[in-house]
Image (cartoon, rainbow, N blue to C red):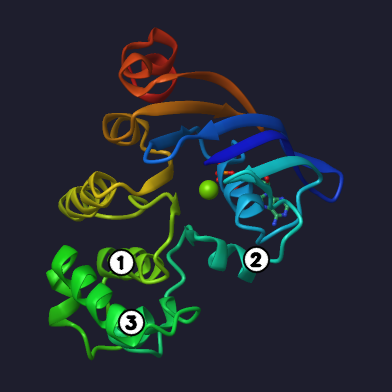
Amino acid sequence: MLQVNGLRVAYGGIQAVKGITFHVEEGEMVALIGANGAGKTSTLKALARMLDSAGGSVRYRGKEINRLPAHDLVREGIALVPEGRGVFPRLTVAENLEMGAFIRNDKSEIVRDMAHVYDHFPRLKERETQLAGTLSGGEQQMLAIGRALMSRPKLLLLDEPSMGLAPIMVQKIFEVIRAVAAEGMTILLIEQNAKLALETSKRGYVMESGQITLTDESQALLHNPKVREAYLGE
Ligand SMILES: Nc1ncnc2c1ncn2[C@@H]1O[C@H](COP(=O)(O)OP(=O)(O)O)[C@@H](O)[C@H]1O
Ligand SMILES: [Mg+2]
């Protein structure tokens, strides 16, 4: 579904992503793990065309997308849940979800999908008319994921969904991520929480200083001594 070849991202003269190659197959959940500053967010932003890459190719369902404008990617079925969530604070929960469906005009299906988001996150249903800015961090993360789902993506890009959240909230959110994956969604998951990401995904890539240094089945990475030492605190 996604084939990235030699992707580079630079900020001025500083290379943050130094020519990485990886892929995600349809229906697969793939984790990209790495320390703070490794270049994970830059990679995801380049994929979602939130910033221009400095080189490389990104093929999505057989089509080169590395030069398309960001809003076209939403139409192509790529949804990004950004680091820090990015919900609209002055809109209600329901309005945020409606915004997620802005490219669609199939009213009855939108209503159905919204009900499905509320099935995943009953908390959001309870807070349907509340302003998003008044939600807790975990609830905002739920809303950001729900909003992304409202565009009916084929590929979901998640940037650090566990960041800054209490363990109970992380658990809830990852339950839903697993449920969405079980429904057949293709997911690229970025996490600093390597244990959680590898326990949840099928395959993983390790990113260090802008490069991919290791890749394997997630189960194998969990047992890899290098990963255990560097990312699992052992
Ligand atoms: N807007 C920016 N301007 C300059 N440098 C940046 C910017 N965003 C990120 N960087 C740098 O790029 C590198 C990778 O950052 P980032 O992609 O955010 O890593 P990660 O998500 O893995 O923590 C870091 O060295 C960071 O300081
Ligand atoms: Mg990041």
Name the residue type under label 2.
Ala
Q: Is residue 231 visible?
A: yes
Residue placed furthest toward the right? 13
Q: Is residue 209 visible?
A: no
Task: Give me the disc on residue 70.
Answer: 2
Q: Which residue is mark 1?
A: 137
Question: Reading the chain from its start, which is encountered first: label 3 or label 1?
Answer: 3
Question: Reading the chain from its start, which is encountered first: label 2 or label 3?
Answer: 2
Q: Secondary structure at mark 2?
A: helix
Q: Residue at x 43, y 85 (%)?
A: 105
Q: Which residue is mark 3?
A: 132
Q: Secondary structure at mark 1?
A: helix
Q: Residue at x 28, y 84 (%)?
A: 108
Q: Which one is in front in this view, the residue at disc 2 or the one at disc 3?
A: 2
Asked whether 102 or 200 is in front, the reply is: 102
The answer to whether marks 2 and 3 mark residues whose Cβ atoms lie closer than 8 Å is: no
Residue 7: x percent and y percent?
72, 38
Left or right: residue 90 versus residue 10 is left
> Quadrant of the rendered structure where residue 8 is?
top right
